Image (cartoon, rainbow, N blue to C red):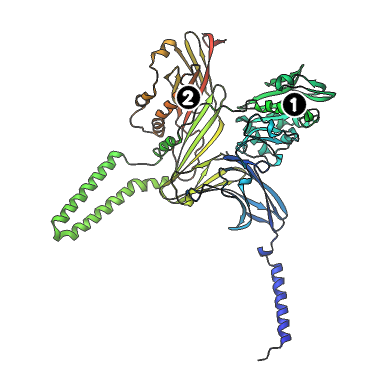
Amino acid sequence: MIINPHAMQRIRHHFFTAFFILILFSPTPVFSAPVTLDVSLGFNGTFSLNKWTPINIVLENSGRTLRGTLEVIVTSGSEFQGNVQDTTYDREVELPTRSKKMYTFTIYIDSVIHPLIIRFRQDGKTIVAKSLNLRTHSTEKKLVLFSGVENVPEASSMPEKGIQPIISHGRFLPENWFGYEGVEVTVMDARVLDNLREKQFTALTEWVRKGGKLITSGRSNYGSFLNQRTRQLLPIKILGLKRIYEIKSLENFCGQGITNSDGFPILRVEMEGALRLVQEADTPIILQKTLGMGQVIFLAFDLDSSPFSAWSGRQAFWKKILSLNMLALDPGFKLEEKNILSAMISSIPARFPAFVFVLLFLIVYIILIQIIFNRLERKSEQRPRYFMLLLVIIALFSFSSYRLFFNNNTPRDPSYNSFLHLKTSDQNMTANAEYVGGLYGLKHGNHRLNFGTTFYPLVPIRPDWPKDVTLRTLAFHENEENQILSIPLEKWSHRFLRMSMRMDFQIRGQAFRDDQGILIMVENMTSHTILDGRIYYAGRFFSVGDIVSGKKLVKRMTNREITKGALFHPEEASSMVEEMVGDNPSSPFENFRNSLLEGLLLQVYSQYHGKQEVIYLFGWIASSVIQNPLTSIGTDGEGVALLGWETQVRRIQGVEGSRIRVN
């Protein structure tokens, strides 16, 4: 058979033409328009190590509509120590044709050994990915954040070492309050504040209420201060502009005043409840207002305009203004984490058989096995029969033990319990909170925890022993409404989570002392009854009983009653615990209290011994203050909380009923 070369050439020509037409018009991803990914980590590329920080990811799609998952993967630990742990933050996204969207996450980074991975995946395939070397972005310094302010001071102007000024565009600020964890102070122009997205504004407000400090300044164009939303954070009443030529009162504040022969504008304002730190004649120059546990500071002059921008006293000014209440007080102390974890494991919400029953079960089993072995030794001709009987007994008791424990707990698998330590003082009604949650599984599975609409700064507690890497992965699944945490567990294993935060807790009180004794008043406005309340004062512990929800505790103690009790000594802690609690705890509350009480007494003594003008009160809450996350499967163990409240004892002239005259 002879093949015409010209015919073969025409065939090849038609084949390649058809092939390229097929590829060109085929809906294959090979020639799909690319998706680009841009990342902004932390604040202008800088984040504080061992703190929560924002990360903003911009996806741009110039092709057909895509639906997939955007993931941020943080890896910590080391392969050498066998404690590598991956934490994934992901969100389902949809990118319409020719669209660009920005997505904001709040992530926790505690190691720079491994790169940060950001990727967009569709149908299990990675469409686009980026890797960041964290070493070039991390700092262990605290940040002073400037947004919308051009006249940023040098590091030498910071009030102490370990403080770093940083500039960030308002567009990239956090959408969760704990995204500001690495920030000491935020200096923000009012226009940036006015343009924040709703979630950003809520995050900033909540951060301030939980102990943050916000500084802002006036401008000739003061329209931003008139916005109703802005007034929630800055309740300023504008009185107009005033031209002045000097601010001599700054000399007492930072050592040098401002003068300008041409004059400069000052924004005259009123802020209800604010303290006037600097005042020129009748015009307030610097106002400071408390908001929750935090504060807002208003400067009546423009930071970016003359004469302040060229003022030689700027360095001293920034040192002074940034140092105002720089360190937030953390009342109380931290309990030993190992003691908390031990108490949680002993309070796993599973139905264990009673000890006496288990003991009888084992005794009967051992006796029967011993009888069978004796028969096997003595009656060799009947060994097959007794051997079969031995197997039946082993199988029967094995099945019974499975039914008694494992099978009874399977419907309750997985299970979850928690412990919350609340620390507050005086009239704050905002508490520093240390939370530990435990997830326990009898079977292999990937378990999901849903804390509702609140986003919490949860981080895993790393186990002390090396295990398989699979056990060390977890994922935060986020959307606009809620945060779900996914944790894989092997059979008969557990994981612990912790978080530190500030939260509203409606309890307040005062303590007074006169010549006759002390008066303690504590008002519990929460929905939780505080059980077994006790106070430490003058080196002694006193019982005050339960503080009922919605009620006020009023306790009067004379000098004789105070000195009648024996002084507490650390070596007596164990015997005091035996007097305060029962021998056999019957509830998670009792188990937690009994397990932690001795360490608690020693911590209280160490912290407050010798402080004659401080009263420390503690009590227990036998319910979950923070919603437990297992809602559809498994079993929630009762959450237990410990409240610690401290207050200064105020000296008074006398007590007449409920009226108190204070010196």
Of circles 1 and 2, the one toward us is 1
> Relative to residue 81, is residue 560 depicted above or below?
above
* Res. 126 image quadrant: bottom right
What's under tag 2, amino acid-wise?
Gln
Quadrant assignment, res 426? top right
Residue identified by numbered label 2? 607
Q: Amino acid at mark 1?
A: Gly
From the top left corner, tell me how far across and down residue 564 is, in percent. 39, 13
Per the image, label 2 sits on a secondary structure element best described as helix
Query: How many marks are shown on the rendered structure?
Result: 2
Image height of 521 relative to 643, above or below: above
Q: Position of residue 242 (x, y in %)?
A: 82, 22
Q: Secondary structure at mark 1?
A: loop
Question: Of all residues shown, which one is farthest toward the bottom?
Answer: 1
Q: CA distance from mark 1 to mark 2?
A: 41 Å
Q: Nearer the viewer, residue 100 or 595?
A: 595
Q: Is residue 211 left or right of residue 403?
A: right
Residue 177: quadrant of the picture: top right
Tell me the residue at 47%/48% (across/down). 81
Where's residue 129, x and y in %? 63, 54
Q: Residues within 10 Å of mark 2 (few under 14, many from 20)?
A: few
For the residue carrying disc 1, how many other residues have a C-alpha within 10 Å: few (<14), some (14-19), or many (20+)? some
Nearest the viewer among 409 and 130 is: 130
The residue identified by callout 1 is: 313
Residue 125 screen position, x and y as percent: 60, 59
Q: Is residue 652 visible?
A: yes
Q: Please state which of residues 461 and 120 is positioned toward the viewer in this rendering.
A: 461
Horizontally, is 655 left or right of 248 in the view?
Answer: left
**Where is 403 relative to 625, above or below?**
below
